[in-house]
Amino acid sequence: TAFFTLTPGVTMRSTPGPVRLLLVATSDGAYSDEDGFNPTLCGLAAFDDIALGGAIVDTSTFESSDDGWQAEPRQDYLPTGDFSDLADLGDLPLPATFCACAVRDSVLVFFDESGEHPLDQDNIAASPWIDLRRGGDLGRAGRLMIYDLYAVMPLSDYVFVQLRARYYPEVCPATGLLYQTGWRDQNVVFYYGESPFCSGPNAPRLRDYSGVIAQGAEQVQLGYGVINLCRTIPYGWICTGLTNTTPWLDNVALGIYGTPNVPLVSTLASTRLQDNFASDGSQVLTSPGRIDVNRIKGNSSPVVGSVLGDTLTATCAATNVEVRLVFRVRPGPFTSAASLAARAARWTTEPTLTARYGGAWYSARMDTAEDAQIPAVGSWMSTFHESDPGFQGSDNAIDPTDVSPSGGYFRLANDILPDNLFTPGSRLDYFVAARFAQPDPRNPGGAAWSTDPDTAGAHFRELEILPSSVDSSMTWNCTLYVDHHDDREFGEQRLEEAGLTTALGGGGGNAEGTRFDRFDVVNSS
């Protein structure tokens, strides 16, 4: 269920008169109507039970009629055309940053004759087809979209970079025939901050597209471009209507990595586990927190009634794979030992990892991800797979103790990591691992795994229920550092933490041993 607030004079009329609701959708006719990998067969979306509340009350249920709704072409939308071009830096405005910049000579641009981006611009430039077989990279699963850029693109301008890819071959599940895919992406757009940004020399932007471009792809085409979302303002802030000539793109490339006998697994920032506090909003140290991801369900920005996604998801674009969530549990001092033991009985112990890294390590096989109970091929979520010993009941059973206030089918009884178990002071270190399921001739013996992140050097992702420094004496750090640099450059984090350590000293009760707790905001916005 989605909720939208209509403000008189801003998003609705402020004078007496009729109010008309308009649901606007745009599709380019390519893969799945631009709704990511959701495999809809009957159009972009379906809507039901549309209600208007406040001074005007109206409800459309569509049970016996169309309730007065009708389809009509968009009168306000005209295709903007293709503005992709090559421009010489000497013909463009001087950059507003004095940092060393990797863009040079001629660059790829997308502005119109006035030096701006028109409303509804949805424009990409396609690369030549890249032959992986000829390059000797067939079967290697890692794919990186690489580029340098200069950008002056504040969030409220609503102009973003978009990255897409398509490939050949893909197998049609209905006919078994080979076909070239449409343009695919990660269903995200890219923002580079409020200040002018330029990628530095030998520091290009990297975006892992391993979950988009299948491991069996033989030929790949990349798409780099721009999208203007000013008309629809999906992120809540009022659009300024201002644009400029940026972004300028340069040195675009496809990077390939990995080995043919290992399927590559990857996660996005928006699908990783998010630090949290006690879910009842209190500072009571016996109150447990939720294990959620930083992705809002049903809305593009937080509103009353919105909730976060309940499960971590990963992508692995290969067939016959086993994907596992592997994690170390450090419970808070007031986590129920009996409840934790009952859940741990469903997990698979990992004695090798426990001996190597310390702590208590476990794993569980992840199930195929679903969105609104529709399987998402190539995606996996942190619920027990039917073949895992910890699986109970049915794979789509709702957790009766954790029903979503907005309805929906995403708080499941088979969560590997349950909500409302871990109390403040708890920490989970984790990674996702994938291999070709046994028996498979591509991975004899089953010993070859890929992981996200790369675990070399004992590098893992982590989630904490804050305050993370709580100990049995019910004391904790007084300083909270909110880190919004996750999935970005880590120079700022190192600098800030060094300053905090210098000022506060060390010796705290959290896993890092600092006198401050850190709240990681894992998503990009």
Image (cartoon, rainbow, N blue to C red):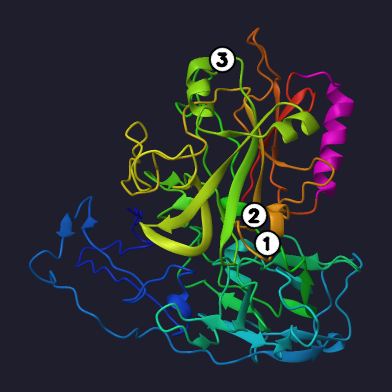
Q: Give the camera-side residue of 452 and 69.
A: 452
Disc 3 designates what residue? 334
- Mark 3: which secondary structure? loop
Q: Which amino acid does label 1 sit on?
A: Leu
Work out whether residue 396 or residue 121 is closer to the camera in this orientation and state it: 396
Tell whether 44 sits left or right of 116. left
Residue 379, relative to residue 400: is it above or below?
Answer: below
**Residue that appears at 66% across and 65% down:** 441
At numbered mark 2, what does the secondary structure look like: helix, strand or loop?
A: strand
User: Upstream in the sequence, badge 3 or badge 1?
Assistant: 1
**Residue 267, percent from left and from top:** 63, 55
User: Where are the magenta residues, as a range?
Assistant: 490-508
The CA span between labels 2 and 1 is 7 Å
Specify which label sits upstream in the sequence, 2 or 1.
1
Q: Are marks 2 and 1 in contact (CB under 8 Å)?
A: yes
Query: Residue 124 location in percent, x, y?
Result: 62, 84
* Three-letter code for the amino acid on which mark 3 is drawn: Phe
Residue hosting label 1? 264
Provide the residue designation for mark 2. 434
Say whether residue 139 is visible.
yes
Name the mark nearer the viewer: 3 or 1.
1
Q: Distance between the residues labelled 3 and 2?
A: 34 Å
